[in-house]
Amino acid sequence: MSDFIFTLDSEPEDEISVKEPAASSSSKKKSKESAQVVEEESALLDPEFNFDVGGGLDLTWDLGDEQDVVKTGSRPEPISVDDIIARRKVKGAALTQKSTKRKRGEDGDDLEGSDASDSEGEEESERGDESASESGEEEFGAQVESDEEGDEEDVDPLASSDEEGEGAGDGMDASEVEAPDDGEENSSSSDSEEETQAQKDRKAAFFAPAPSDAKSSNTTSFTALNLSRPLLRALTQLSFHTPTPIQSSTIPVALAGHDVLGSAVTGSGKTAAFMIPCLERLMYRQRGGAGEIRVLVLVPTRELAVQCAEVGKALARFMDLTFATIVGGLSLKVQEATLRARPDVVIATPGRLIDHLRNTPSFSLSSLDILILDEADRMLSDGFAAELGEIIAACPKARQTMLFSATMSDDVDQLVRLSMNRPVRLFVDPKKSLASGLVQEFVRVRKEEEREAVLCVLCGRTARRATIIFFRSKKLCHQMRAVFGILGMKAAELHGDLSQEQRLVSLRQFKEGKVDYLLATDVASRGLDIKGIETVINYDMPGQIELYQHRVGRTARAGKKGRSISLVGEPDRKMLKAVIKRSEADTVRHRLVPTESIRAMMEKLVDVKVEVVEVLKEEKEEKLIRQGEMEIKKGENMIEHKDEIFSRPKRTWFMTEKEKEQAKTVSKDQYDAGFSSKAEKEKEKAGPTRDKFSGLSRKVKRRKLAMEADEEFGDKGAVNASIRSAKKAALPKKIGEPLAPTKKDKKRKDKKVVKKDKTRVGKVGFDSELGQRRSGGASREGVRAKKTDSGILGGKKGKGGKGKAGGGGKRKR
Ligand SMILES: Nc1ncnc2c1ncn2[C@@H]1O[C@H](COP(=O)(O)OP(=O)(O)OP(=O)(O)O)[C@@H](O)[C@H]1O
């Protein structure tokens, strides 16, 4: 792994060790250089913007009024893994207690004594049991402690190497870290230069140049952006004093009604950048009469929709605007009622929005003024293509469209289907792909079987709180959640197998610090803005660099510091290289995890895994029971409310369950393809899918089939074989000439010949020339031609022959 970075980490393990990345003169120079190469229209945007770090919006992740309407009917009551673990511990404790008693009884203690000793013993054993029952927690706690202590002691070899590392560190930093050297910079810039002139022209025709006011990044206050008082008040309350570069560039352009394609690093305030101009424009909407839906914000995940709505509501707190969050997993009925009241702003995920477009009478998007796609590159991806197409078709053509993402591409092909009207491209420092406050650490995983242990050691020693851990699959995420539970680490999970209520509860628990870890799949990788996240751990490297940017972008937001730790195994090399290429050298570290700690943890995990299997088994059984109960309840409801249920108008679905399942498989495959695809590997292992007869001639194939049949039927096969050979013998012998054709056949043949010749007439000159050139006179073509020619030239039969004879003759010449 020679391409690994050997920047040794010398930060203490037991405190959050994210220090401000040293703003070395080289990095400053680099960022200045990169500022010079930004696109012309965004050249004046200030990439070095400093946030008012104290400010910001504290999201509650509260469903508010919607909480009681969370759909619970379609899924059984959630089961908590923690409850199962706790229950098993109690059970285990009781069993230990019983066996102790039995043992004592067997030992034949006298009653009194035994009583006394029992009670004592009970207390003791209780204590013992307690410690046994909490052994997971305590042990792990102790392990952490000892790890820490060990750390301090162990530090010696490590620290010395760290020290050495540090000693050499600065020098090493420069020499060993694969910093994007000039060559690479050039190559990456030449990548963009590789754009053909035609592509450049296309872009020039598609995008409008940014108006001059969009370029002024030196807007130091929102007041200078001509916003109305209620908005300014809200901004002040949120402690948003200075607009971020993406905000100061977007707001004037969006207020002027232009379409916008915006991009800036994660955590740079893009939500407010599109929300502020929308709200400002809504201030001047026509009042009175029934309201209209004016703004639609489309986002890829439900959590993001809830978050976006919270930002919108916070900014509009002094305005009389109404919002609706339309996402799956929440009550359809309540959403229908909300939509009937025609809210000003709808924030939705595509699937549920389409459901309402189809099934909620009186809901339409015909009055829409502004359409926004947040995380637009994701929304434009194949997974959402069909849904997006249907939504765009339902929106009026004369609308304003705005697209935002930290990983936005300006690929015109992707954008044309949105029928945007000469959008303005506002990219803040496109060369910078990660937040400046982010330190990226990489841990080498030497053997795959160590991965879990490495994670647990890291969480015990280094990342002890406010940590998001990303996994590539829901199953793995859930399994590790159980491991964390057994080890006594407080964790919540967030992935698609949970109900919407569970997902939001997990987020709230994490945000409120009730749990230290949020174990998540990529459903949490985009857009989520949770204050105070200190560490993001990539249990496995994501398949695409964009996904990496979004994942690690959950920390170091709004000018704050943060750290990412990625576990890198052999297959992740390529991704690691790509990440390093895009990073500034002084933000990259190689973290060492002591081998002894990993080994100890691996031993511990052997027992833990046995317990995990039991816990998951119990969970599954409980799930089945609850599912059964729910089905019974459903059946009862059907009987009781049959008339009402069948009188409801039939809903139409954008996708049937089967289609949904298919789409899910497609996106899963696409997602997996990003990783070193498991499916591909399996396919490779399986080898090419060849029929056992493929490549054989028909004759051989028939013979093989016959032999197989013979084998199968034994003697009967031999009889069949003789029948077959008898039949074959009875066939008329081939004499090289076709049998004398019937009258009908002749007519048909003549017609065919005429037809064939007709098609050739036009090509005659060319064909003959080609034929002559190829054959030099007496050609193969001549041989073939003889048959037809005899029909045509010889004028054996058919009137048409005469007419065509000239053509044929011509060809022969
Ligand atoms: N002008 C501002 N001043 C101070 N803080 C701000 C300002 N604008 C936004 N913020 C804060 O910055 C944080 C990040 O904002 P936001 O979630 O909009 O980022 P983003 O660019 O959309 O990130 P992502 O690409 O991850 O979706 C939020 O906590 C928000 O409250």
Image (cartoon, grey):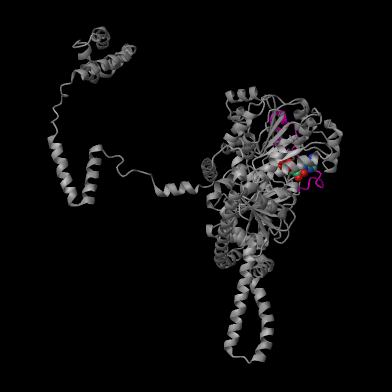
Residue 803: where, in percent of width, then height?
26, 7
Res. 345 in view: yes
Q: Position of residue 85 (x, y in %)?
A: 62, 65
View quadrant of ligand 1: top right
Residue 518 image offset from top left, x and y in percent: 67, 54
From the viewer's perspective, tell me whether residue 523 is left or right of residue 345: left
| Residue found at the very far bottom of the displayed protein | 110
Rendered position, 765 above or below 594: above
**Of 393 and 216, the residue lying toward us:** 393
Q: In this picture, which residue range is highlighted in magenta?
A: 31-59
Occupied quadrant, residue 129? bottom right
Left or right, 184 with respect to 69, comes to left
Question: What x and y, as percent, mark residue 669?
Answer: 52, 44
Q: Nearer the viewer, residue 340 or 433?
A: 340
Is 40 one of the magenta-colored residues? yes
- Residue 249 showing in the rendered view: no
Q: How many marks?
A: 0
Residue drawn at x 85%, y 34% as measured from the top left = 223
Q: Is residue 270 left or right of residue 499?
A: right
Queried whether the magenta region covers residue 202, the answer comes back as no
